[in-house]
Image: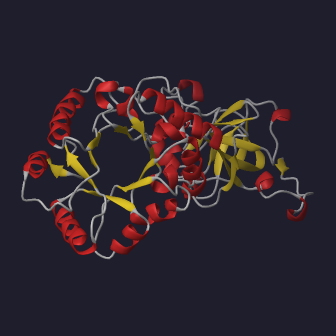
Amino acid sequence: MTDELDTTFTDTDTDAFDYAPLRLTIDLGALADNWRDMKRRSGKARTAAVVKADAYGLGIEDCGSTLYHAGARDFFVATVAEGATLRSYAPEARIFVLSGIWPGQERKVFDNDLVPVIASEEQLSFWMGTVAERGEHPCALHVDTGFNRLGLPLDDALFLASDVTRPASFDPVLVLSHLACGDTPSAPMNKVQLESFRQVSAAFEGIESSLSASAGIFLGPDYHFDLTRPGIAVYGGEAVNGVKNPMRPVAKAEARIIQIREAGEGQTVSYGGTFLLKRASRLAIASVGYADGYQRSLSGSGIPLREMGHGGAYGVINGHKAPVAGRVTMDLTIFDVTDIPENAVRAGDYIELFGPNVPVDEVAHAAGTIGYELLTGLGLRYERQYLVDED
């Protein structure tokens, strides 16, 4: 017996969001409140907003505009193209491009008044040649203090700071670095990087300095310097391991239930036949899969939810938890709704994949990843709705 989807409605008399197979609700009021919270936690430091990767998957236009109107005047993006897009929504902001600049990008950088973050000797040489030809333009300097990712080596940066022969046109407005273990407050490397960055900040006296993203802000005032750069916390994600997340959830992802079916004890569910039912069950088939960023690693293990040490992947339907059953597939995921009253779930209902009732980081943990990846990996099939704070 199956509970088929009610098809009495038509596209012409309903709102697209109300009946979309997948929908994503972004609470812009919560986004603004989270940024204000991080601003408060940043103390005397100014607070930027990181909107790279399409504002962590939630939309650079709407999120950027919201954060700008909330008071953010410094933004960080990953690429020149992102910066050019943001410029229309943050007209008077400083927009820093974390990947710096490469030949061919000069016009877009200058026309959109972007601030490239110089991160290597090659970029430094190119930038000095560019400003010598085009005239002065602000830049920032990234210094590696132990991450071994982007940035000039510490000794090279200190030499550059004291080099009296460097061109006057090279005049960074910000020096920055990035913490490798900021999400783990007890990690010894945090203090090592702090001491190294203090050398950098002192060497570039009179130039603003920035060390902390979201996690670093929670480490306290010693790490704040002149400018903080919150990212994941603004979008409601967990910034510090092992600590209750104080941020408001911003995104809610939901999938429509296409069908509810019954299956008997001993039958298997989904690809591979690896999920064996130990009882007669009711199964809800939802229109979401790994093509939508609901990762295959969220597949059900066949172990009851209560017996799984990390809680397992689950969704919430009308206030009831429903664990994933069997393998997540490209377009569909199956949820076990046996323990949910029959009158509390039907075809056409929506299951919350993450949001206020299913923390995004809890889902990420079940997938063996982090909330950043779930948010930035959202597919293109979500119908989006932005909630605007009327205040």
Left or right of 195 on screen, residue 341: right
Q: Nearer the viewer, residue 202 or 32?
A: 202
In this orientation, does residue 314 appear?
A: no
On the image, the x and y values in percent for residue 290 come to 55, 54
Q: Is residue 259 above or below residue 369?
A: below
Left or right of 33 on screen, residue 101: left
Residue at 70% in and 45% down: 387
Q: Quadrant of residue 212?
A: top left
Left or right of 268 on screen, residue 337: right
On the image, the x and y values in percent for residue 232 come to 46, 40
Q: Nearer the viewer, residue 283 or 86?
A: 86
On the image, the x and y values in percent for residue 216 come to 35, 32
On the image, the x and y values in percent for residue 76 come to 41, 51
Q: Is residue 221 above or below residue 157?
A: above
Q: Is residue 317 above or below residue 86?
A: above
Residue at 37% in and 74% down: 107
In this orientation, does residue 228 appear?
A: yes
Q: Quadrant of residue 167?
A: bottom left
Q: Is residue 328 above or below residue 126?
A: above
Q: How is the image coloured?
A: secondary structure
Q: Nearer the viewer, residue 272 or 114?
A: 114
Mark count = 0
Q: Quadrant of the C terminus?
A: top right
Left or right of 302 on screen, residue 23: right
Residue at 30% in and 30% down: 223
